[in-house]
């Protein structure tokens, strides 16, 4: 049995970052454990093929929630990445850092040192932005970020942005930069036409380091403790039980679902829950698995009057031609996730930052990538980004192969329901603007018959889906907050040599897709683990939008009827 300095559990969005940074010092021996296998697949690499790894049990744990009581008992899909790169190998590749106020909120909730100016240098450290470095964007980091095909291949992208401006919202060239509210191009983790997972960005360049050992198909059973000090991991590789020790630290980066589950299997959590699962309590920490949050989304769908949508490209022959071009050139429709324009807006006056996000898609299609209509269409994915509803992750057995019990309590909170009503009405307000007149056909869904509060509520209950952003189950916060699990240094409260670094530590969900903030958090955590001085904070003044207390948007819509 070898002895390592650091053991990292999970080679996902956070774990690959940590493996890279911790092993940069050749005196540190690092073990990276991943329950899945290799990420070598054309369907992982090709951005347009994103529906395929998502649907594959090779790359996706395939979790589902318990029947959601506020969604009429529906069980909601909760995909989680399995394999090198984790969820960054199966996600939609959308790159959103979140709003400045999200990180100010974290600090207010006890995550000292995680305000926006503290986090911005780590966003920059991680990134190579295709348009170069400035005071907001990075130019020399491992992670390649671009804007797809820069909206060149379809006129609908620009029409959506123009409609937003006509509706009274600002236009922004970079929602990850100075101007974070408004309509503009969307950014994605794609480099040279290939998906930029953390496996590709952080792990592949350093996988041959002599001091780094990567073990795939390694399912972590439990954390080993000597008293209250973490000393290693017991795990299983293809039926073989193995155990490794860590001289310095064990870091759990298994994600918002699996990290609290591993803690609980190791005796860390709620006494009553562990007892019912037949697990002896090592350390009482009731916040483990609580505070579960997620983004929901629906998609508005319209017929398109002009033959410009991507719907004809969804046929098998057309998909094959796109794939061949991508194989030969790494360009064209194969090199994008197709979400090339987007928006961030506020649902109401009195909000300092946006709480609604749009992804625009120039096709009418299902989640599995097949067309949902004959002819041409387009759709707008939309949902509130600051949900108040909270759920939990529980275990019912000590068996590491057993799926956890996941309950999000989606749509529980009245503020969430009101935000959804605003989503529906504000979206219609945008799409009816003159910029969409040449393209906008009949509304397919929700349908113009879905109009009053009760109708909207019921339609959302029946049609809403997860945006696949679970977080918060090992919340960062103060020791006196019984819902928190880790401190500002990502150390588990009351235990030694044990940290959690992934989306589970987020106190609240950021305003957007969560892959970018997970990578940022891992970059910052690596410095904390190594005992390095953290990067100097930025000096960005955080100013709310003009007239935010009284106005929902900056301007007035050109078309009100």
Image (spheres, rainbow, N blue to C red):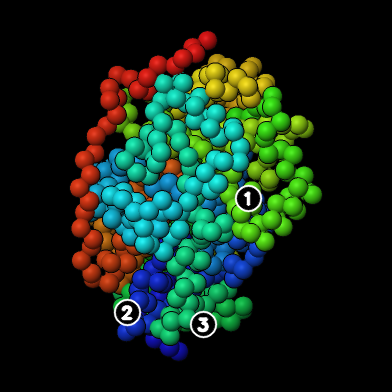
Q: Residue furthest right?
A: 317
Instruction: Mark yes or no: residue 243 visible.
Output: yes
Which residue sits at x=52%, y=55%?
Answer: 190
Callout 1: SS = helix
Judged left or right of residue 80, residue 4 is left
Which quadrant of the figure contains the N terminus? bottom left
Cα separation between marks 1 and 2 = 40 Å
Single out the mark in the foreground, 3 or 1: 1
Q: Is residue 338 left or right of residue 408?
A: right
Query: Which residue occupies 63% across, 50% down?
Result: 332
- Residue 25 has which mark? 2
Image coords of residue 524 (percent x, y): 30, 61
Image-quadrant location for residue 152: top right
User: Can see residue 415?
Assistant: no
Percent position of residue 328, x then y: 67, 61
Numbered circles on residues, count = 3
Horizontal and vertical percent for residue 541?
A: 21, 40
CA distance separating discs 2 and 3 = 26 Å
The residue that mark 3 highlights is 242
Task: State which mark lies toward you, 1 or 2.
Answer: 1
- The answer to whether the residues at label 1 and label 2 have Cβ atoms under 8 Å apart is no
Instruction: Using residue 165 as the reference point, say whether residue 157 is left or right of it.
Output: right
Taking 164 as reference, is 339 above or below it?
A: below
Q: Residue at x 74, y 39 (%)?
A: 312
Residue named by callout 1: 332
Look at the picture and state if 132 lies above or below 544: below
Q: Residue furthest top?
A: 561
Helix, strand or loop at mark 3: strand
Tell me whether circle 3 and circle 1 mark residues in contact (CB < 8 Å).
Answer: no
- Which dot, 2 or 3, sits closer to the camera? 2
């Amino acid at each position: 049995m070898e002895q390592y300095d650091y053991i990292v559990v999970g080679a996902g969005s956070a774990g690959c970052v940590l493996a890279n940074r911790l092993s940069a010092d050749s005196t540190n021996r690092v073990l990276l454990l991943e329950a899945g296998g290799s990420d070598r697949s054309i369907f992982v690499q090709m951005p347009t093929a994103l529906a395929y790894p998502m649907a594959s049990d090779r790359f996706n744990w395939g979790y589902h929630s318990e029947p959601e009581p506020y969604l009429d008992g529906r069980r909601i899909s909760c995909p989680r990445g399995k394999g090198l790169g984790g969820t960054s190998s199966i996600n939609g590749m959308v790159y959103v850092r979140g709003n400045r106020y999200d990180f100010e909120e974290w600090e207010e909730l006890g995550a000292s040192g995680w305000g926006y100016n503290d986090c911005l240098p780590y966003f920059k450290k991680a990134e190579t932005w295709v348009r170069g470095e400035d005071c907001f964007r990075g130019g020399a980091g491992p992670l390649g970020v671009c804007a797809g095909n820069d909206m060149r291949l379809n006129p609908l992208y620009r029409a959506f942005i123009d409609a937003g401006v006509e509706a009274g919202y600002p236009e922004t060239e970079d929602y990850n930069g100075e101007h974070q509210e408004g309509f503009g191009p969307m950014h994605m983790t794609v480099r040279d036409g290939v998906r930029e997972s953390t496996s590709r960005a952080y792990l592949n360049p350093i996988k041959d380091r002599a001091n780094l050992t990567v073990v795939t198909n390694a399912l972590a059973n439990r954390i080993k403790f000597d008293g209250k000090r973490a000393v290693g991991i017991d795990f299983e590789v293809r039926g073989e039980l193995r155990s490794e020790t860590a001289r310095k630290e064990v870091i759990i980066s298994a994600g918002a679902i699996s990290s609290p589950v591993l803690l609980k299997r190791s005796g860390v959590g709620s006494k009553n829950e562990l007892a019912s699962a037949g697990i002896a309590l090592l350390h009482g920490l009731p916040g483990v698995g609580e505070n579960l949050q997620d983004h929901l989304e629906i998609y508005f769908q319209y017929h398109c009057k002009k033959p410009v949508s991507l719907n004809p490209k969804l046929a098998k022959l057309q998909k094959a031609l796109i794939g061949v071009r991508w194989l030969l050139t790494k360009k064209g429709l194969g090199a994008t996730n197709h979400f090339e324009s987007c928006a961030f807006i506020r649902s109401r006056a009195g909000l300092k930052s946006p709480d609604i996000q749009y992804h625009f898609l120039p096709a009418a299609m299902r989640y599995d990538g097949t067309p949902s209509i004959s002819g041409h269409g387009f759709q707008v994915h939309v949902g509130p980004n600051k949900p108040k509803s909270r759920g939990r992750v529980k275990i019912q057995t000590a068996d590491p192969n057993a799926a956890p019990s996941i309950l999000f309590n989606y749509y529980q909170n009245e503020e969430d329901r009101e935000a959804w009503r605003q989503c529906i009405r504000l979206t219609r307000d945008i799409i009816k603007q003159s910029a969409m007149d040449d393209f906008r056909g009949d509304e397919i869904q929700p349908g113009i018959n879905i109009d009053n509060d009760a109708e909207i509520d019921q339609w959302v209950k029946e049609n809403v889906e997860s945006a696949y952003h679970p977080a918060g189950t090992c919340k960062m916060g103060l020791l006196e907050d019984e819902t928190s699990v880790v401190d500002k240094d990502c150390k588990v409260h009351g235990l030694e040599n044990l940290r959690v670094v992934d989306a589970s530590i987020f106190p609240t969900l950021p305003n957007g897709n969560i892959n970018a903030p997970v990578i940022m958090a891992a970059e910052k955590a690596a410095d904390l683990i190594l005992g390095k001085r953290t990067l100097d904070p930025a000096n960005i003044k955080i100013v709310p939008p003009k007239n935010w207390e009284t106005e929902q948007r900056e301007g007035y819509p050109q078309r009100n009827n």
